[in-house]
Image: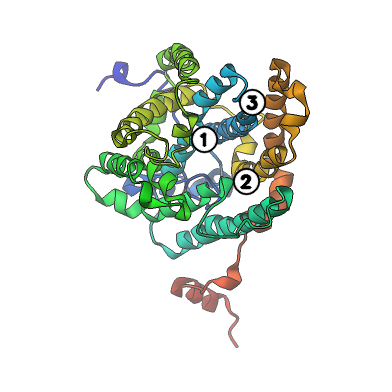
Amino acid sequence: MTNTLRPHGYQRSPLPPAREATATDTGPRSADGDAADRRTRSTATAGPEKLKQRDSFFDNAKYLAIVLVACGHGWEPLTDGSRTAEALYMVVYGFHMPAFILISGYFSRSFDMRPDRLKRLVTGIAVPYVLFEVTYSIFKRYADDDPGHPISLLDPWYLTWFLAALFIWRLTTPLWKLVRWPIPLSLAIAALASVSPDIGDDLDLQRVLQFLPFFVAGLFMKPEHFQMVRRREVRILSVPIFAVASVVAYWAAPRMSSAWFYHRDSAQELTGPWWSGIVMTLALFGCSMVLVACFFAWVPRRRMWFTILGAGTLYGYLLHGFLAKGSRFWGWFDTYDWVNTPAGAIAVTLFAASLVTVLCTPPVQRMFRFAMEPKMEWAFKKDAAELARDRKKAPTG
């Protein structure tokens, strides 16, 4: 093929290959297959600094997405009194979690049942899930004066659903690599979930299943796909697409429930006919993927002042929830009328963005690493290879 068929900027700054995952990423960091192994071997002589280098594009994308998550939570109380706030809320909810989940899938491509990866899955996802589910439940009991709120590891409350979902999605990664048509199959599962009100709330399975296609799509993304959305024409086209999405959302705000974007309820629970679940699943998946592509088109590829914060997005995600919910429990939006004005909405947006930015910083990461990235060496057996290395290192008599 000639160079004219390659994406714009192909020779100037290609995206670096993905790297092996750590469990606290919103997804793993290495590409799968022999090509990834060759890339790893080719960089083995570059020194530890080269191997540990992070991809600025994905760190930037994760940071910008988490800012939108926090802003969305800040806008939620304003949507009842402002059609504009509701429209912006719907647009943002159309792509910010799908973008996060797609990146999670992309970074999960190397996951298998290897002991070290299972260990990271436990320490980086399962353990934080348990700790934050318990902490959030206690917080609700006292902050919301709700002593009857249960502590249940089977019923994720508020933001912890994402950890439960990521744990399940990542465990199923080998299966999706095995089947012939993974994305259509995941869409079929999501559509069936959307018309199945009997699924219940255990592990928030509705969300797990309805968001599943975004994770599976990420599993089969390649670096060149992200390169394609960085083309100049995609950037230009993304502007009218976002404009049209905003206009459609403004029209739909009084006519459609934004709960469709949460993917946590069946069509029947949203008072729609059963077939609307299938239609909305397919329609929202298509719209979300288009908006995610437009979002990625504007994500900077170079290192920015906020790039370092991309490594701490899970910290910002889980920690900002206490203030986001606390503001509702303590009636801040009802007490201060100025918050419901346009100037108040701007202030809420700036405060939410600033708060989550601070919570992603390295000092906060160091402070809460014991809960988010515990090592827990005491909890795991050493495998045979590690025991052999220890015996070799042991001094001989």
The image's mark for residue 318 is 2
**Which amino acid lies under the numbered mark 3 shown in the image of this protein?**
Leu
Residue 337, picture quadrant? top right
Q: Position of residue 25 (x, y in %)?
A: 54, 46
Amino acid carrying label 1: it is: Phe
Residue found 26% across the figure and 39% down from its top: 184
Using the image as rendered, state which of residue 77 and residue 376 is in the foreground. 77
Residue 159 as seen in the image, left or right of residue 9:
right
Quarter placement of the C terminus: bottom right
Q: Quadrant of residue 189 in the image?
A: top left
> In the image, 178: left or right of 366?
left
**Residue labelled with disc 3:** 78
Q: In screen coordinates, is 278 left or right of 230? A: left
Q: CA distance from mark 1 to mark 3?
A: 31 Å
Decide: few, some or many residues near mark 1? Use Cα within 10 Å; few <14, some 14-19, many ≥20.
many
Residue carrying label 1: 58
Point out the image quarter for the N terminus. top left
Q: Secondary structure at mark 2?
A: helix
What's the mark number on residue 159? none
Above or below, comparing residue 199 to residue 259 in the picture: below
Q: Position of residue 61 (x, y in %)?
A: 53, 32
Q: Nearer the viewer, mark 1 or mark 3?
A: 3
Q: Is residue 95 above or below residue 24?
A: above
Residue type marked 2: Leu
> Which percent across, then down, holds residue 183?
29, 40
Instruction: Please name whichever residue, 143 or 353, is drawn nearer the observer in this view of the structure.
Output: 143
Residue 139, position in %: x, y? 69, 52
Q: From where the camera sits, is residue 297 visible? A: yes
Q: Nearer the viewer, mark 1 or mark 2?
A: 2
Residue at position x 51%, y 44% in the image = 26
Image height of 384 relative to 174, above or below: below
